[in-house]
Amino acid sequence: MAITCVSSGQEFGQNFLVAPIGLLDMYNSGGAVDTMNWIIELSECIIKIKGTGCGRFGAYSNIKPQRYVLETVEFLKSLWLFGTAIKELPSSIEHLNGLQELGLSNCKNLEMLPSSICNLSSLEDLYLSNCSKLNKLPDNLGNLKYLKYLRVAGSAVGQLPSSITRLENLKGLYSSECKGLTILPSLSGLCSLTELYVNKCNLTEIPEDIGCLSSLERLEMCSNKFESLPKSIKQLSKLEFLSLRECNMLRSITELPVALIRLEAINCKQLCQALPDASEFKLCIRSKRYEYVNFLFTNSFNLDHKAVSNVFEESLKGSEEPTAKFTIFLPGSEIPNCFSYQSSGSLVNIPVLRQALVNRKFMGFAICAVLGFQEQEFHHYHGGISVGVYCHFETCDDQIGFPRYDQYNVGPVFIDSDHILLGYCSFSKFYKSSQNIKRVLAIADVSDYVDISLEFKAYSPSYKVKCCAVYPIYAEPMEIISATIEDIGETSRKRSGRSDDNEEQVESHPKRICTQPN
């Protein structure tokens, strides 16, 4: 039997070899064990680890031991056995009292874990991804009270043990591509969980108590078979990212948490109802810690477009301005009727009452752009879709241009048909930062309205803006603003001594300036 001893400070060479059956004794080896990944071949050997000075041991796919015998290693923090040929772990693994990280990912022959693994009182991170023969986790997994990350993605695990609800320190649960996982256990005790990944798991329903995950920030449930989301999902007060890509049985999304920054309901073939009612949606766009919010329904062709546009329009009514710039992206080629100013190209003009700008009653624009693909380009474009909005102000006395008013990023998606971008552009940042606007608005003799041009630009040669539209958002009700427009228009005509012909042209503007479109 070949015996190799490693003393403190000793380094392994790059051609370090161990006989097929051997004992590797790493007694008091200090940091030298980190160089174990340079071992060229170590097959069918028994590795015995003992001592107190070893902080980390790593064996990789070129090391193929069938069995490990582990004795107490008080200070071993990390044990990496990625891609090795082990079939099982010895029950003696429980003696690694200080172990914090155990890496077993890509161990294709690993069939089971001993229940004693749940006695690792210091374990924080357990890697079991792509262990294709591992179909069960220990029933007493909940005993790992300090476990923070559990990674079982791509394994054969068909059920998560019910004791998982006791893992109150768990921050990340990654169980995507567990094909046999059709239902989740109660998750109510996972009060520290911030990330939950259950993509491609054949889930037929989501547990109602998912709303108890009070710390959850990111939830991915793509390519599953559930038809709806539980109402309790709106109780996830910290959820910022929700991905439901390719959930082809999903029919409705009626509840959304108010902290949501990005919703991905992409390629959902049966999705019809995609947003909550307007009162709920208002909370989503007015309770934000972040500046930008995305609601993406790319290639979800069964969507009720009219219902989406109604929610969009209603949510912008009222004197309270949205605190977030938001985008709704959905299939379609027709501009909703609520948009009073439309253009067949990428440039649209709108007159805005100067007094409304002076009094800060003008809050911003609702915007719409229809994106189509250039005929010479490949239709299945995969890349970040981004649309810039450029703004130009003009009166009869002065004009102001801005390099870019705003930008809307949809992100990387596959698209093969026209899509509509709906959004909101706030005007408040210009009130605060532009001395040019303040100068123009301060001139007493300028015209009663300011002509504002918005130009939409697509940042890719693969697609273009086919048509666009806007309508203004005011803080006051329509009837008050309309009366103000008429009064100031009349005052302007008297002051300027315009002819009757000019009067007809000026009077056409109040008809175009609508605060709440019909």
Image: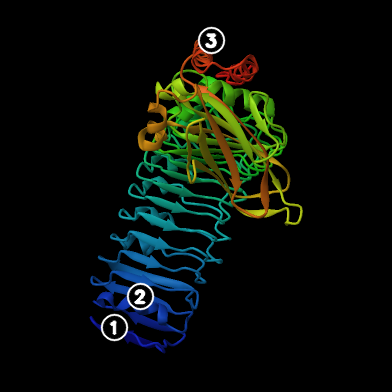
* Quadrant in which the N terminus appears: bottom left
Q: Earlier in the sequence, mark 1 or mark 3?
A: 1
Q: Quadrant of residue 71?
A: bottom left
**Against 393, is 410 above or below?**
below
**Against 502, is 66 above or below?**
below
Q: Earlier in the sequence, mark 3 or mark 2?
A: 2
In screen coordinates, is 168 left or right of 406? Answer: left
Residue at left 71%, top 49%? 373
Q: Position of residue 108 (x, y in %)?
A: 56, 66
- Say few, some or many: other residues with alpha carbon within 10 Å of mark 3 (under 14 / 14 to 19 / 20 or more): few
Mark 3 — residue? 479
On residue 6, which mark appears? 1
Q: Position of residue 421 (x, y in %)?
A: 61, 38
Residue at left 60%, top 46%? 457
Mark 2 — residue? 48
Q: Quadrant of residue 300?
A: top right
- Say few, some or many: other residues with alpha carbon within 10 Å of mark 2 (under 14 / 14 to 19 / 20 or more): some
The mark closer to the camera, 1 or 3, is 3
In screen coordinates, is 329 left or right of 333? Answer: left
* Amino acid tagged 3: Glu
Asked if residue 23 can be seen in this view, the reply is yes
The mark closer to the camera, 3 or 2, is 3
* Amino acid tagged 1: Val
Q: Earlier in the sequence, mark 1 or mark 2?
A: 1
* Quadrant in which the C terminus appears: top right
Q: Position of residue 341 (x, y in %)?
A: 63, 28
